[in-house]
Amino acid sequence: MVNVEPPERPLSAGHLIVAQLEREGVRRIYGVPGESFLDVLDGLHDSPMSTVVTRHEGGAGFMALAEGRLTGLPGVAIVTRGPGAANAFIAVHTAYQDATPMVLFVGLIPVPDRGREAFQEFDLSGWFGSTAKKVVMLDDPTAAARVVSEAVHTARSGRPGPVVIGLPEDILTRPAAPSRTVQPLAVARPRAAEAELKELVGRFERARRPLVVVGGEGWTTQSGRELIRWATERSVPVLADFRAYDAVPHDLDGSGAYAGSLGYGRSDHAARLLDDADLTVFLGAPRGDVLSDGYARGLGSETVLVLPGDAPGHCGRIDQFIAAHAPSFVLDLVTAPAALQADVAWFRAARVAHARFRTPAPATDSVADDAFVDLTAVMGVLRQELAPDAVITYGAGNHALWPARYLPHQAPASLIAPRNGAMGMGIPAAVAASLAFPGREVVSVAGDGCFLMNGQELATAVGHGAVFVALVVDNGCYATIREHQEDAYPDRPSGTQLTNPDFAAWARSYGAYGETVATTRDFRDAFRRARASGLPAVLHLIQDPAVRAPATVG
């Protein structure tokens, strides 16, 4: 009698999704479990990918977004239908406006139940169609591997962004024959044609006050350093788009071409550079709303855009458009011969002004009296304490003005902050940064309002071994909105007050390190203790409630 091996049982669609993610190089998937995708969870049981179980779908989405920004490979999150998808929506909007690669899986009701107002039913395309690069429904189990591979490719290609995949519960358990993964699709990195490069060099040579603005994703150590070297040798100032400060390395001695950033919290001298330039070259970022102070600055200068795809949100003239991956384009630009005649005095003035702006001001009266923690002094300590490649995270609010102004970035993928102004991103981003780069130092600066929007992810950090120091700035209000009220409705604060817990005790209840810092002189030692704890740590900083921003300089 001949023994015949039984045929191999086909993988289910849910298990094939996991296998394809593995083949795409995904190392972690973030999510809150749901009954609508149990088969995917079962596939993850034996997977080498880590399943990072979060406490809220918004936290899961922000972690995936952070991973996408740090690694260039789309971060992956998975949530359930209806309420779970609603909670994750904030991360999809952020990834779309920030141009960050991300893939969100959403478990859905069974196919036969559609259109019957089934439990937690909603319209996937109706919800996400206006704020994702692509929305796709997996209605064919045999297409599982292809759909995943195409989603990863779409999220990374051209202008990066989020892709949303709907997973009907009943489709996931069906056999996916053939049960084979597919070859990941290569992502094109378009390069400029020789004629385009020659035309741009000619524009640089004719300009007296050329300016480069960097932004977007994908910058490398080589591309950032080469651009700064090239620009410094040719007296061309380099500015960064809002919250793209880590695209190029900053120098602390004022010897390089980096001259600051645009957008909220920018200096007056950076705005003047944008206004006065006779040639502005945007590498990886269009001249959008925030960068141009509400479509108001720098609109008339000769303009060159270097982008891998379309430029939604760009305002003002375009004299040359080059479809190219900006960091790769830099390596072509720096090898092209160019005889620039830039205004050296203008360039030097830009460097001097930026050096003055980013130098912490003298201690305020409150610091001298030691009544509160002065964030400017705190940033001075962090500049001395942090490693050059430390990752800085923060959400949205006035607390972000301090790290954006004073903390330098010497390495790419060292900043995670929402360009769309979403609150609650800082702590999930810190969790993801620590898991993605366990050897790098991670510090999150959070306002008291921003922190508690996703502060529960401290539990995720403890559970998964993420290590970072979170500085929670306690001023008892939503300071950004309070500042607007003080300008428009003096002496009539309304709807902006906060009642805060003891953040240090709260952190300790999770098994993290927690300490309250009430005076500036105590910060350095407290920071060192937090860092040495080997735990996710929260330092509760008591700030003067009347302080809204760093001292105005430059």
Image (cartoon, helix red, strand yellow):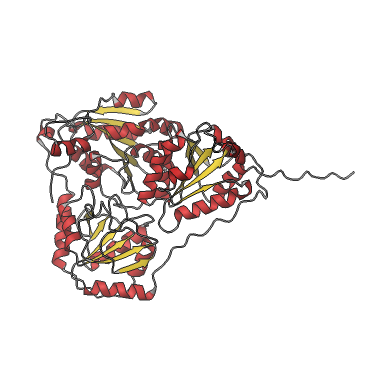
Left or right, 500 with reference to 46: left
- Does 305 sit above or below residue 372? below
* Location of residue 70 in the rendering, given as x and y in whole percent from the top left corner: 40, 49
Q: Residue 128 sits in which quadrant? A: top left
Asked whether residue 433 appears in the rendered view, the answer is no
The picture places residue 213, in percent across and down from the top left corner, at: 27, 60
Residue 427: give x, y in percent of width and height. 35, 37
Any part of residue 195 in sight: yes
337 on left or right of 158: left
Q: Residue furthest right?
A: 1
**Residue 491 placement, left or right of 541:** left
Quadrant location of the N terminus in the rendered image: top right
Residue placed most toward the observer, 244 or 519: 244
Judge whether 531 appears above or below 321 on screen. Answer: above
User: Would residue 502 appear left or right of 146 to someone viewing this image?
Assistant: left
Task: Tell me residue 131's x, y (percent).
Answer: 40, 48
